[in-house]
Amino acid sequence: MAVEIERKFLVTGDFRAEAHAQQRITQGYLSSVPERTVRVRIKGEQGFITVKGIGNASGASRYEWEREIPRAEAEALLALCEPGVIDKVRHLVTAGAHTFEVDEFFGDNQGLIVAEIELGHEDEDFLRPAWLGAEVTGEVRYYNSALMQNPFKNW
């Protein structure tokens, strides 16, 4: 079983000069039930389907399974998804031995920018860039599946 260990932070400063890659992402959810979210995602010309389980007590660890699928199939599945598509650009920023995935949201989530870092274990040390703000790991409202139901513009 694959387990994802990830911590999430708000972004409070300018990270763009440090970004070495970026990609537009469109995603929707076939199921947003916390115990088993099923996500469909398009990144460039690639499609993906991902199943995630419910997080542990800290919210940093949870089961994750992902497979690449043809873009045309991802587009067809997006049409079946629950209302509320997520539109964002993911910026990759290396800091020390880790890479932060900085998501800049658009549409109904315009103005929200969060950074995620995948770790080998929950207490692993990592370099904290100056633009990294408050930690929001485990705060459900920052989950993409929650943002489609209650977007940032409504907070």
Image (cartoon, rainbow, N blue to C red):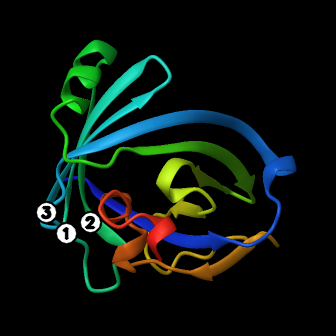
Q: Which mark is residue 33?
A: 3
- Asked if disc 2 and disc 3 are in contact, CB closer than 8 Å, the reply is no
| Residue drawn at (28%, 13%) of the image | 72
| Comes first in the chain, label 3 or label 1 | 3
Q: Is residue 124 above or below residue 25?
A: below
| Residue drawn at (19%, 58%) of the image | 32
| Comes first in the chain, label 2 or label 3 | 3
Can you give x and y, in whole percent of width and height, for residue 59 in the image?
34, 78
Can you give x and y, in whole percent of width and height, for residue 53 in the image?
18, 62
Say which residue label 2 marks: 62
Query: In the rendered structure, which amino acid carries the disc numbered 1?
Result: Ile
Say which residue label 1 marks: 54
Horizontal relation, residue 67 to residue 30: left or right: right
| Residue drawn at (50%, 79%) of the image | 136
- Asked if disc 3 and disc 1 are in contact, CB closer than 8 Å, the reply is no
Can you give x and y, in whole percent of width and height, for residue 110 in the image?
58, 56
Quadrant in the rendering for residue 100: bottom right
Between 95 and 20, the one lying in front of the other is 20
Q: Is residue 93 above or below residue 74?
A: below
